[in-house]
């Protein structure tokens, strides 16, 4: 059980913020022409993410001691510096940085698209070109706030972690529970209306 059941199952619950990317699956159905494709998309995305996550964690745990892997900012970047293919292919960490930049740009593009689309629907706006500029400017401004790696680490471990837990798990589960309660109430009302209609029809007959 690692450091004990209390650490694993209680204090370790805060680490669920690492699965915050699953929240993007909530917004996918409204953009699909056929809802039957949603299951394939969800299973494929979760499966691919799980494979990459398993490979990343395995690489860090097998290559570095536990102290070094927890203290370094980017342990996967350090792991890529150990890759060599003879004397011709060296310093492959530059390729890792290039792939990492592309993945981060892709992530920011997807997040910006969903944010602008949701804001446009909530505000009932017809055009969203200016919204994209506002959101990207805000993201750029917030990205300049941390002045050093210590502040960046604090924001990730103390602020971002709990924001993701509140938005994804807390608010998401609350909406799901309330939606089910509303659905049950509506079904009961429909059942009562049908019973009343049947009763009046019997009396009239």
Image (cartoon, rainbow, N blue to C red):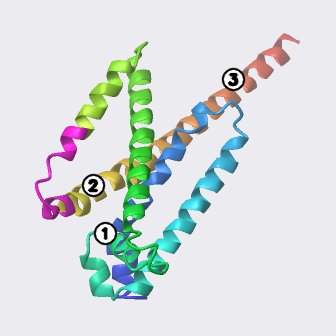
Residue depth check, mark 2 versus mark 3: number of the one nearer the observer: 2
- Residue neighbourhood size for the residue with mark 2, other residues' Cα within 10 Å, grouped as few (<14), some (14–19), many (≥20): some
- Residue indicated by mark 2: 160
Disc 1 versus disc 3: distance between alpha carbons?
A: 61 Å
Query: Looking at the picture, does residue 96 appear above or below residue 178?
Result: below
Disc 2 versus disc 3: distance between alpha carbons?
A: 48 Å
Q: Position of residue 68 (x, y in %)?
A: 28, 83
Rendered residue at 57%/68% (across/down): 51
Rendered residue at 42%/55% (across/down): 20
Q: Residue furthest left?
A: 147
- The image quarter containing residue 202 is top right
CB contact under 8 Å: marks 2 and 3: no
Rendered residue at 58%/58% (across/down): 46
CB contact under 8 Å: marks 1 and 3: no
Residue depth check, mark 1 versus mark 3: number of the one nearer the observer: 1
Q: Which range of residues does the magenta coloring cover?
A: 140-153
Query: Looking at the picture, does residue 106 appear above or below residue 137?
Result: below
**Could you tell me which quadrant the C terminus lies in?**
top right
- Residue neighbourhood size for the residue with mark 1, other residues' Cα within 10 Å, grouped as few (<14), some (14–19), many (≥20): few
Rendered residue at 74%/26% (across/down): 195
Q: Position of residue 170 (x, y in %)?
A: 38, 51
Q: Position of residue 86 (x, y in %)?
A: 48, 81
- Residue indicated by mark 1: 74
At numbered mark 2, what does the secondary structure look like: helix, strand or loop? Answer: helix
48 or 154, which is in the foreground? 48
């Amino acid at each position: 059980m690692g450091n004990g059941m209390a650490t694993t199952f209680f204090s370790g619950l805060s680490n669920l913020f690492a699965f915050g990317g699953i929240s993007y699956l909530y917004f996918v159905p409204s953009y699909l022409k056929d809802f039957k494709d949603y299951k394939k998309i969800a299973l494929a995305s979760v499966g691919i993410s799980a494979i990459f996550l398993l490979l990343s964690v395995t690489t860090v745990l097998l290559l570095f001691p536990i102290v070094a892997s927890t203290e370094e900012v980017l342990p996967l970047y350090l792991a890529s510096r150990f890759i060599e293919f003879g004397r011709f292919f060296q310093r492959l960490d530059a390729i890792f940085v290039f792939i990492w930049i592309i993945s981060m740009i892709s992530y920011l593009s997807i997040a910006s698209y969903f944010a602008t689309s949701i804001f446009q629907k909530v505000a009932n706006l017809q055009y969203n070109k200016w919204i994209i500029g506002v959101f990207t400017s805000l993201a750029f401004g917030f990205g300049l706030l941390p002045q050093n790696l210590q502040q960046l680490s604090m924001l990730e471990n103390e602020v971002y972690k709990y924001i993701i837990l509140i938005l994804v798990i807390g608010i998401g589960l609350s909406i799901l529970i309330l939606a089910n309660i509303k659905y049950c109430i509506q079904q009961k009302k429909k059942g009562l209306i049908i019973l009343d209609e049947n009763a009046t029809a019997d009396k009239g007959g």
